[in-house]
Image (cartoon, rainbow, N blue to C red):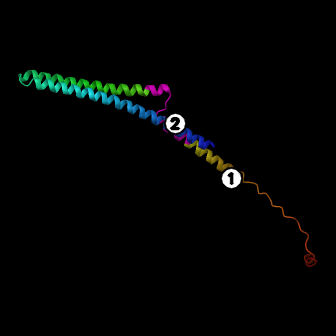
């Protein structure tokens, strides 16, 4: 197997591994998002139930509760945003600790491999043109001229 083939195989293996890890991270984030969204929906439903139960009372308590619910919703959204950010940072940190290259690092490595392959190809081309294959003379048996040829020469 040539160096080029080995480099291409290594590049493909690194790319595949990074892609699988990236997809696992996206899957984990999606699962966390689904659970967070489910919790948020449950809170909204309970708030709606509470609001429906308060329809016979004066508007002031309902308005106060609506304001508090709006504040609570804002806090939940803020907590959720921080959770997503922390999750992303920890996932990235974990990848760095394990030694998984980032997308940019893989891209840089791919460029470097391409540059090395170009340099190798140029060296091989230069070597081939500097050292052309030796021409091996073909040997043909020397045959004595025929008697008729010898007379013509004389």
Q: CA distance from mark 2 to mark 1?
A: 35 Å
Residue position marked by numbered label 1 in the rendering: 129
Q: Is residue 96 magenta?
A: yes
Quadrant in the picture for residue 9: top right
Residue 58, horizontal then vertical, whole percent: 5, 22
Quadrant in the picture for residue 113: top right
Question: Looking at the image, can residue 93 be seen?
Answer: yes
Left or right side of 42 for 17 = right
Magenta span: 93-113
Q: Quadrant of the C terminus?
A: bottom right
Left or right side of 66 for 12 = right
Label 1 neighbourhood size at 10 Å, few (<14), some (14-19), many (20+)?
few
Foreground pick, 45 / 9: 45
Q: Is residue 119 magenta?
A: no
Quadrant in the picture for residue 136: bottom right
Foreground pick, 30 / 100: 30
Left or right side of 70 for 29 = right
Secondary structure of the residue carrying tag 1 is: helix
Which residue shows up at 5% across the image and 24% down it? 56
- Residues at circles 2 and 1 in contact by the CB criterion of under 8 Å: no
> Any mark on residue 14, and which?
2
């Amino acid at each position: 197997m040539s160096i080029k083939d080995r480099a291409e195989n290594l590049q493909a293996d690194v790319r595949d591994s990074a892609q699988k890890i990236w997809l696992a991270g996206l899957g984990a984030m999606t699962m966390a998002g689904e659970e967070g969204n489910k919790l948020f929906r449950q809170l909204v439903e309970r708030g709606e139930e509470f609001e429906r139960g308060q329809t016979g009372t004066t508007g002031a308590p309902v308005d106060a509760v609506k304001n508090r619910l709006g504040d609570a919703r804002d806090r939940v959204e803020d907590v959720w945003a921080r959770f997503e950010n922390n999750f992303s940072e920890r996932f990235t940190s974990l990848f760095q600790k394990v030694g998984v290259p980032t997308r940019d690092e893989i891209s840089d490595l791919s460029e470097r491999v391409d540059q090395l392959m170009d340099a190798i190809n140029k060296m091989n081309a230069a070597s081939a043109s500097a050292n052309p294959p030796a021409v091996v003379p073909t040997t043909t048996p020397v045959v004595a001229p025929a008697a008729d040829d010898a007379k013509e020469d004389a």
